[in-house]
């Protein structure tokens, strides 16, 4: 038995809860309960969206790649990112619709994962949320 579709009011309430991360540069430390809550909200928005764009700012390529692969897997896609070597902090972007990625050095202070949802049927979902912890979906 499937759960009912969330109402517009439900979506707007979730959007408000996720938007609290928008004013920070680095993903905050979260309790186990908060991590579970955020994962559930992100996965619900994933179900309501057509595709997602993820942006990762990390101290190292290995850290960024691991975070990206964990988030992509959690969103229901499978990818093995074959990225060129990059020293220092990185910015990594991935589009789930095209399966395309972008990698560059990054000198800014932000760290974490931004998730952008793109939906044609649930426009209230559209937006960029985060930064969320790099390890939010770590197994």
Image (cartoon, rainbow, N blue to C red):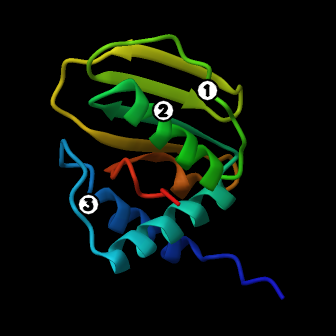
Q: Which residue is mark 1?
A: 81
Above or below, comparing residue 32 to residue 136 in the picture: below
Which label is found at residue 65? 2
Query: Residue 16, position in %: x, y?
Result: 35, 65
Q: Earlier in the sequence, mark 1 or mark 3?
A: 3
- Give the quadrant of residue 55: top left
Q: Earlier in the sequence, mark 2 or mark 3?
A: 3
Q: Nearer the viewer, residue 17 or 33?
A: 33
Query: Residue 17, position in %: x, y?
Result: 34, 68
Q: Are marks 1 and 3 in contact (CB under 8 Å)?
A: no
Decide if residue 122 is in sight here. no
- Give the crowd class for mark 1: few <14, some 14-19, many >=20 residues within 10 Å: some
Above or below, comparing residue 119 to residue 99 in the picture: below
Query: Residue 95, position in %: x, y?
Result: 61, 30
**Left or right of residue 32, residue 76 in this image:** right
Q: Nearer the viewer, residue 93 or 23?
A: 93
Q: Earlier in the sequence, mark 2 or mark 1?
A: 2
Above or below, comparing residue 91 to residue 136 in the picture: above
> Depth-wise, is mark 2 or mark 3 nearer the camera?
2
Which label is found at residue 139? none
Q: Residue at x 45, y 11 (%)?
A: 85
For label 2, the SS is helix
**Left or right of residue 87, residue 23 in this image:** left
- Give the crowd class for mark 2: few <14, some 14-19, many >=20 residues within 10 Å: many
Q: Are marks 2 and 1 in contact (CB under 8 Å)?
A: yes
Q: Residue at x 46, y 46 (%)?
A: 127
**Left or right of residue 127, residue 75 in this image:** right
Q: How many marks?
A: 3
Which label is found at residue 20? 3
């Amino acid at each position: 038995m499937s759960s009912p579709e969330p109402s517009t009011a439900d979506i707007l309430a979730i959007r408000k809860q996720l938007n609290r991360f928008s004013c920070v540069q680095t993903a905050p430390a979260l309790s186990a309960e908060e991590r579970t809550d955020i994962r559930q909200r992100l996965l619900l928005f994933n179900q309501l969206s057509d595709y997602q764009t993820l942006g990762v700012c990390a101290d190292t390529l290995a850290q960024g790649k691991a975070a990206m692969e964990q988030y992509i897997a959690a969103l229901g896609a499978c990818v093995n990112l074959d990225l060129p070597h990059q020293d220092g902090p990185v910015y990594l972007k991935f589009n789930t619709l095209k399966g395309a990625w972008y990698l560059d050095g990054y000198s800014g202070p932000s760290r974490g994962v931004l998730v952008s949802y793109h939906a044609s049927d649930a426009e209230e979902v559209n937006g960029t949320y985060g930064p969320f912890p790099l390890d939010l979906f770590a197994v």
